[in-house]
Amino acid sequence: MAQQQKREVVELTTFQEYKNFVATHPVVILKASATWCGPCQTIKPHFINKVNELPLGVSVILIDISKAPSISRKLSIRSVPCMISIIRGQPCDVVMGANIDGINSFFGKIQKLLGQ
């Protein structure tokens, strides 16, 4: 029986965990949000759909800014929701807010970068 490949999705809370993860994963999407953030909850289904359109080799980091202040501070995340594409350890593109067009554009850039 063939084993079904799954996307790696992790929830991180420390900057050291973040550094270790991005050092070993070439293409990462980081989503910063908070449980108390209404717009974060509103875009969650759309975010999941857009991630599922990407190749399985794209990994996902989820952070709750209330639980991961060191990551938020080091990456200068000042508002949520916030998504960052990280390619070979370097932040490349950022989208903040719950604007669907902005989120679609963010994911379109990643797909273009990956040749999709």
Image (cartoon, rainbow, N blue to C red):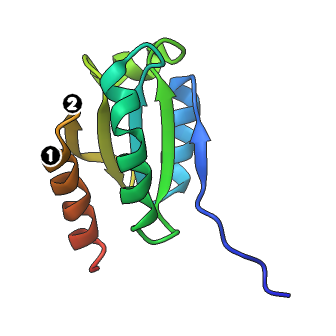
**Image x and y of residue 91, in percent:** 29, 44
Report the amino acid beneath label 2.
Gly
**Image x and y of residue 87, in percent:** 34, 56
- Residue 105, by quadrant, is bottom left
User: Which residue shows up at 60% across the image and 42% down it?
Assistant: 10
Please report contact status of discs 1 and 2: CB closer than 8 Å, yes or no: yes
Which residue of the protein is positioned furthest toward the right in this rendering?
1
Determine whether the residue tagged by mark 1 lies in a helix, strand or loop.
helix
Residue 35 badge: none
Residue wearing tag 2: 97
Report the amino acid beneath label 1.
Gly
Determine whether the residue tagged by mark 2 lies in a helix, strand or loop.
loop
Residue 102 badge: 1
Residues 89 and 41: in front is: 41
Relative height, residue 20 to residue 71 (above, below): below
Left or right: where 86 falls relative to 26: left
Relative height, residue 54 to residue 49 (above, below): below
